[in-house]
Image: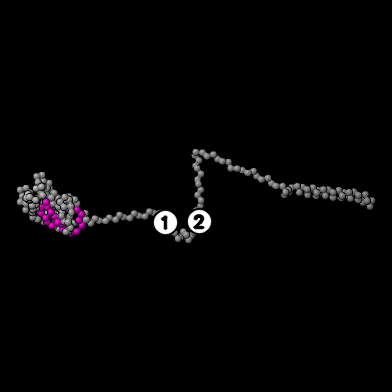
Amino acid sequence: MKVLRVLRPIIVTACIGALSLLTACATTGKSTAKSSKPAASVAQPAPPETKPVPVPATETSPPPKAVSPAPAPVAAHTASAQPAVSSEEPAALPAIIIPVRHATIIGSQETSILLDNFTAFVSSVDGRKVESGRNGWNVPLTIDVGHRTLGVEFNRGVFFAKGQLEFDAAANARYELKYATDAELFGKNSFCNFWVVEIQSGQTVSLVSKASVEKHPEPPKQSLLPGNPLTH
C-alpha cells in the first residue's frame, strides 16, 4: 500500500506528461496540414503576351496567295432546275452551197484592116431584146439554165444577116456565138451561118442556123433645091 502511495504521484505525472505530448503533436500536425493547402484568395499571375515576330520578305519567297471565299451553298432545287452546261464547243455547221443556175454567152468578132470588122452578137433571148447590141458583143450575157432560143445577128459595114437558133444551157457553162460568111471583099455576100460552142470544151452545142446576107438601104440623098436647109 505504501508503494502505491509512493508511485501514484509518479504515475499521474507521467500520464499528464504523455497527454501533453500527444496534444502538442496533434496541434503541430493540423498546422502543417493547413500550410500545405494553397490559399484560394491568391490570384495566379497571367502569362506574358507573345507577339508574332514579322518574318522579312525575301526575293525567293513567294507572295502570299489570296484566299478566295468559299462559295455559298446552292439549294438542291435550284441546281436541279438549271440545265447542265456542256464544256464542249458546238460543232460548226457545214457551209450551204447554193448552186448557180445561170450560164453566160458572148459574141465573136474578126478584125479587118481594110474594111469594117466582122461581128456576130446575140440580139435577143427568148424574145427579149438585148440592149447592148453590136457594141456589147464581148460582154458576157447571163442566161437561165435550160432550153433557150436566141436571136442572132451579123454585121459588117452595110451588110447584115439575122437568124435564130436553139440550144440547152447548162449551169455555170460559158458559151460563144460563132459564125461563117462570104460577106468579104471579093465574096458573093450571100449567106451567114450561126452556131453556139461551149468555150471550155470547144464542143458545138446547137444546130447551125443559116441566114441570108442583106444590105442596109442607102439613106435618101438630100435635094439641093431652093428651100432645102442644106442650101443655106
Q: Which mark is residue 73?
A: 2
Q: Are marks 1 and 2 in contact (CB under 8 Å)?
A: no
Residue found at the very far right of the displayed protein:
2
Helix, strand or loop under label 1: loop
- Residue 73: x, y in percent? 50, 56
Q: Residue at x 35, y 55 (%)?
A: 91
Q: What type is the residue that disc 1 sits on?
A: Val
- Residue 192: x, y in percent? 9, 53
Measure the C-alpha gap from mark 1 to mark 2.
Answer: 19 Å
Left or right for 18, reference 76: right
How many C-alpha atoms fall within 10 Å of the one at disc 2: few (<14), some, or many (≥20)? few
Q: Nearer the viewer, residue 203 or 110?
A: 110
* Segment tinted magenta in the rendering: 141-164
Q: Which mark is residue 209?
A: none
Which quadrant would residue 125 be assigned to in this image? bottom left
Q: What type is the residue that disc 2 sits on?
A: Pro
Secondary structure mostly seen in magenta is strand
Q: Which residue is mark 1?
A: 85
How many C-alpha atoms fall within 10 Å of the one at disc 1: few (<14), some, or many (≥20)? few
Q: Nearer the viewer, residue 45 or 12?
A: 45
Q: Residue at x 13, y 54 (%)?
A: 153
Evaluate whether residue 107 shows in this view: no
Queried whether the magenta region covers residue 143, the answer comes back as: yes
Queried whether the magenta region covers residue 189, the answer comes back as: no
